[in-house]
Structures are given as C-alpha cells and as structure tokens.
Image: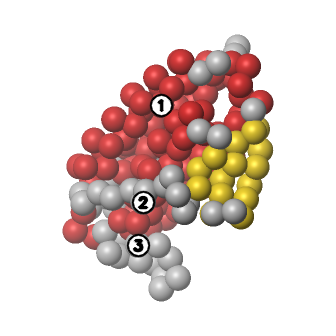
C-alpha cells in the first residue's frame, strides 16, 4: 500500500471521529477552561479543526512560517467547525490524491521567521505534526467534555457513554 493510500484511509476514519467529538461541543461553553493554564474549550476545538488542513500545508508548501504564510484559524460556532471539517476533508483528500508519492521524503519545515522549529520529511511531518497532534488534542477534548458531564462518542469502538445508552 502506498503512503498516500494509507494516509487517505486514516484521514477518512479520523475526520469522522473529529466530527463526532466536535459536534458534542456546546458553543455557549467555548470560554470554559478546566484550568487557568489550559486552552478554552473553543480554542481547543478550533485547534483540532485547524490542524486538519495542515496536511495540505505539508504537501503543498516547503514550510509553514508562523510569521509570514500563516493566518490563525477563526470560527464562531460548533456548526461552523463542522462545516470547516467537511471543507478541509475534501481539500486534503484532493491534495493527497494529486501528491507525487516520491515527494513524501522531501523535507518540510515549521518555522517562526528565521527560526526553524522542526525540519523533517513530509511523511514524518504529516504523522507527527499533524495527525498525532490532532489525536493528542482530541484526547484532551474528551476530558474537557467529561468534566462538563457531556457524553463522549466512541471513536475506536463504543465509549462508556455509548455502552450505557
């Protein structure tokens, strides 16, 4: 199986999982934080959605520079986040389908001006900077929702909430 095909299979499952958990986030609770040092519920939800399009950045750009070619993601509601996930999923599927398999090993950089935060092959950047990052924050989001006594959907099988329906 090609690298592109494996990422497409993963993307389809994981975007569906992101949609399930993001759809549980009440917009009216976006300002809630479990701790003063934590991101708010809205910030965390927006970050998960924004990271989805980063696969396109990894594939189409040589680098993402927070000081020059990056614009922070903005959304105003949970419904808007789901719309962005739908849009981003289509864009990323298209980018992966058009991507030259031979270029997965090309270097990609995450930068802040002249400072290189990380440089690695595109295949590794998509795994570590994008996908694993999304999974990490989805795990955080599930804890936030649990603390708010909001049912958590199963993503890799039924959740405890699914089992008690």
**Residue 135: image x %, image y %?**
57, 49
Residue 25 rendering spot, x and y as whole percentages: 32, 58
Vertical order, 9 against 123 (above or below): above
Element type where label 3 sits in the image: loop
| 74 horizontally vs 105: left or right | left
Q: Name the residue rendered at 25%, 49% in the picture.
A: 80
Judged left or right of residue 14, residue 1 is right
Q: Residue furthest top?
A: 1
In whole angstroms, how far apart are the C-alphas of marks 3 and 2?
A: 16 Å
Disc 3 crowd rating (10 Å Cα; few below 14, some 14-19, many 20+) is some
Please name the residue shown 63% across and 63% down the image: 113
Badge nearest the viewer, 1 or 2: 2
Residue 25's disc number: none
N-terminal-most mark, 1 or 2 = 2
Q: Nearer the viewer, residue 99 or 133?
A: 99
> Quick one: label 3 or label 1, which is nearer the N terminus?
3
- Kindly check if marks 3 and 2 are in contact, taking CB atoms under 8 A apart as contact: no
* C-alpha distance separating marks 1 and 2: 18 Å
Question: In front: 67, or 86?
Answer: 67
Above or below 111: residue 121: above
Q: Which residue is mark 3?
A: 40
């Amino acid at each position: 199986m090609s690298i592109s095909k494996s990422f497409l299979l993963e993307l389809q499952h994981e975007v569906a999982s992101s949609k399930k958990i993001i759809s549980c986030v009440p917009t009216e609770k976006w300002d809630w934080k479990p701790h003063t040092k934590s991101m708010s519920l809205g910030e965390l939800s927006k970050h998960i959605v924004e990271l989805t399009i980063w696969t396109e950045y990894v594939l189409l750009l040589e680098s993402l520079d927070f000081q020059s070619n990056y614009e922070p993601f903005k959304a105003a509601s949970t419904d808007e986040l789901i719309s962005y996930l739908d849009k981003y999923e289509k864009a990323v599927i298209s980018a992966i389908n058009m991507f030259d398999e031979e270029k997965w090993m090309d270097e990609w950089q995450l930068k802040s001006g002249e400072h290189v935060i990380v440089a690695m092959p595109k295949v590794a950047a998509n795994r570590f900077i994008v996908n694993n990052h999304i999974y990490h924050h989805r795990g955080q989001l599930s804890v936030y929702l649990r603390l708010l006594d909001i049912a958590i959907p199963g993503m890799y099988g039924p959740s405890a909430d699914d089992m008690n329906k």
